[in-house]
Amino acid sequence: MLLNLKNILVTGGAGFIGSNFIRLFLEKHRDVDLINLDKLTYAGNLESLRDVESDPHYHFYRGDITDAAFVRRLFNEWHFDAVINFAAESHVDRSILGPQVFIDTNVRGTMTLLEAAREFGLERFLQVSTDEVYGSLGPAGKFTETTHISPNSPYSASKASADLLVRGWEKTFNLPTMITRCSNNYGPYQFPEKFIPLMVINALQNKELPIYGDGLNVRDWIYVEDHCEAIDDVLYKGKIGEVYNIGGGNEVQNIHMAKLILNKLGKTESLLKYVKDRPGHDRRYAMDSTKIEVELGWKPRHSFEQGINETIKWYVENEKWWRRIISGEYQNYYKLQYEER
Ligand code: NAD
Ligand code: TYD
């Protein structure tokens, strides 16, 4: 029997994946109230949700998942049936510049939500995690749900810590938790600090495309909508206490991706610039998604060709969205990250 959820809390819904998820969820489930709790950090952007904000089933609260009193009040008001925790500091390079906020939000914030869920009770607590908790692969093999956790960056260490807390709360307090671990997402509304949007908007501006190290690191790219559908499947059909890997089945070397983007935009490869490598840079990620495919019947619906064309088209057509971002605080970050690299 399908779970009967009446209201769900989505944290971090003003970010890249959260905003895509909200759009998809509201379209698919017309009888569920969705409450979006977001701190609106540099990465949170309500402009990514303009088309859903007047939906009567959508409710936005600005707040911090580390603020236990606030979180408690919200749970008391809504008595959520489910929580999907997207809220996080999400960028590896920023976690190297300053790890503290990663521990605060990703670790302490997750615990605050777990504690509220324990106090008020709910049907499902879904933690949105990442393949990066598994560490790095050599040239062969894939991560499965039983691969040992071995994170290599402050970001991935904080996400792995959160996963362990979620597990602990399930085993000890019988909290009905589930964890999804997904590979690298790309698509509309991704903050331009991440690789694909950075390559696209730099190319559009005829700016250099910074390639870390030898450019041969591999990521397993998934179109964001496919990830969102997987989360919806796990929420409604997943088994309590389980971890589900979600991958795009689409491994690409960074240099290949950068060249492909230049090519699609009709730009010259002389824009490529090899720069100093990221410390602790994971060489390769690849996900084995057999479990979610076999048990829940999920499969990515977008081919890479389709997904990347849609994504590039979106950034070309939504210049106003990214221009506003890169004209603000982003400039300071960009200087700090790339000026002397
Ligand atoms: P994002 O950085 O675009 O968005 C994060 C959102 O969380 C923002 O809206 C931000 O304002 C909000 N937030 C941050 N700190 C908060 C706090 N203390 N309280 C409330 N809200 C807060 O990130 P994303 O790329 O959309 O990633 C979403 C989730 O998916 C993260 O948990 C991330 O670890 C995970 N994930 C991301 C990827 C990827 O490729 N982007 C892959 C796998 C998993
Ligand atoms: P990123 O989008 O930061 O995701 P993650 O590191 O979490 O996988 O980076 C994807 C890959 O692209 C990663 O191997 C680092 C590389 N990269 C560059 O070469 N140049 C850049 O400017 C950025 C942001 C990333």
Image (cartoon, grey):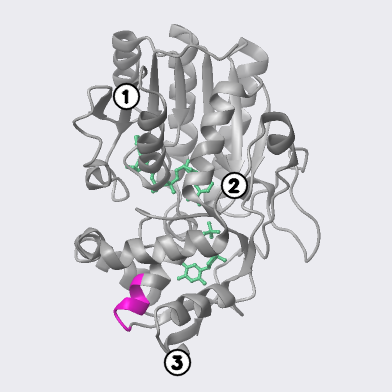
- Residue designated by label 2: 300
Decide whether residue 204 is among the magenta residues: yes
- Residue designated by label 3: 270
Magenta region's main secondary structure?
helix
Q: Between residues 152 and 38, which one lies in front from this camera angle?
A: 38
Q: Give left or right: position of 103 versus 183.
A: left
Give residue 35's mark: 1
> Badge 3 local density, few (<14 within 10 Å), some, or many (20+)?
few
> Badge 2 local density, few (<14 within 10 Å), some, or many (20+)?
some
Marks 3 and 2, how far apart at CA: 34 Å
- Looking at the image, the residue that sits furthest to the right is 140
Give residue 119's mark: none
- Magenta region, residue range: 201-206
- The amino acid at mark 2 is Pro
Which comes sooner in the sequence, label 1 or label 2?
A: 1
Q: Measuring from the top left, give residue 289's x and y in whole percent.
A: 70, 43
- Callout 2 secondary element: loop
